[in-house]
Amino acid sequence: MYKTVDIRLPSVGIFAAPTTISYLFGIPARATYRSHQVDIKLNHSSIAAKDGNKNTSKLYVENAGMLASFLEGFVPEELFYKSLGAGSNTARLLDLANTTAVPIHHITAGNISTQLPQLAHSDEVLQDVSNAVASGLEVVIPRTALTNHSWTGSGYIMRDPVTGSGDYRISGGLSGDSQTDCALATKPVPVRYPKMSLLSTLLIAASPIFIDDDGSVAQFCTAASCGFAGIRAAVVSDCAAMNCGNYGIYSDVASNCRGTCFEAGTGVYAYSAAYNCSGWNYGSAPGYGVYSSYLATGCFGYSQGGTGLRAYIANSCYGSFVTATYKYNMP
């Protein structure tokens, strides 16, 4: 259509799910999650018009940039089964301004003195606009910040008037898209705590700390039980657990953990990897101090009647008896 040649070059982007951490006496106690974010800092291509016309390649770059901005929202929307336009990106916000009759300003070095005072945006965004124009760029921006679903902010283009390349930015400095999944609660959520008479029952149940979720994380926890496991989660970090059943700690990945088991089980079980963990097994039947199907590094394992540490790859590990297909930096 544009009669151009487009060669894709190495580019850089980040896809993230930011969390907000709440602290209790300086210790992380809770994490809340509300959104997905896309931040494409470099979308790099080498583009040339077949007829050598620079205006042709400039038009192609401008349209490709707007399409890329649209895709920064469209891809997460498809991936997470969202409605079209749920994400807040520059293309979406400019379209929203157009459909809601919010004026869109084209700011250059020649008109910034009259255009900038008409804008109603945060100080950060206005400073961004001023810096861009001072650097020789042009800015396309709606007159006011906009609300898209539960997200409110600004979306604007900082564009090179010669090449057509630009930064399609939204509030917060993201060169991409923000997808808000959960609205903030407007009313307190009642929470019920178990009665003290039930606490002992919980402590001898299957797993006193059990998060049944493939993406679950247990951190800074201690537990004791007489069931399946003291602590059970996908990722366990900086925890200590004691169990008279099968496992002290049962996880996919364990880091900086201490686990003790008093039966024919395992002190620390980490299916994929165990990092800097210590595990003890004091059962009369064979068991494991630390067990990982793949990697154990910097770990110590002790077993009274079995194997101190077992892994496919063991690196810088030691214990009462270590068995591994590959061993590195072993004492």
Image: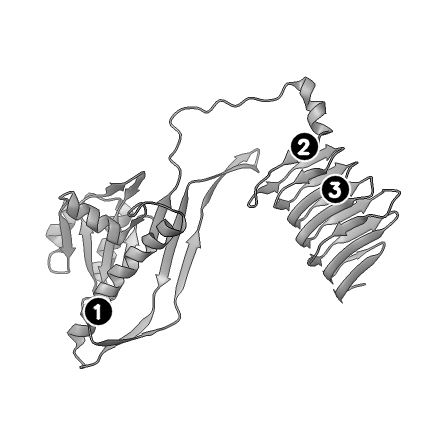
Q: Which residue is mark 3?
A: 247
- Could you tell me the amino acid type at mark 1? Tyr
- Could you tell me the amino acid type at mark 3? Tyr
Observer-nearest of 285 and 277: 285
Q: Secondary structure at mark 1?
A: helix
Looking at the image, is mark 3 or mark 1 earlier in the sequence? 1
Looking at the image, is mark 1 or mark 2 earlier in the sequence? 1
Observer-nearest of 95 and 40: 95
Q: Position of residue 57 (x, y in %)?
A: 21, 73
For marks 1 and 2, give the CA distance: 60 Å
Classify 10 Å Cα crowding around label 3: few (below 14), some (14-19), many (20 and above). many
Quadrant that contains the N terminus: bottom left
- Is 303 left or right of 215, judged from the image as shown? right
Quadrant that contains the C terminus: bottom right
Q: Position of residue 123 (x, y in %)?
A: 26, 45
Q: Position of residue 78 (x, y in %)?
A: 36, 51
Q: Which residue is mark 1?
A: 60
Q: Position of residue 305 (x, y in %)?
A: 88, 48
Q: Which residue is mark 2?
A: 208
Classify 10 Å Cα crowding around label 1: few (below 14), some (14-19), many (20 and above). many
For marks 2 and 3, give the CA distance: 12 Å
| Vertical placement of residue 35 versus 325, above or below | above
Q: Quadrant of residue 315?
A: bottom right
- Residue drawn where x is 52% and y is 23% of the image: 191
| Vertical placement of residue 330 versus 303, above or below | below
- Residue drawn where x is 68% and y is 20% of the image: 198
- Is 269 left or right of 161, judged from the image as shown? right
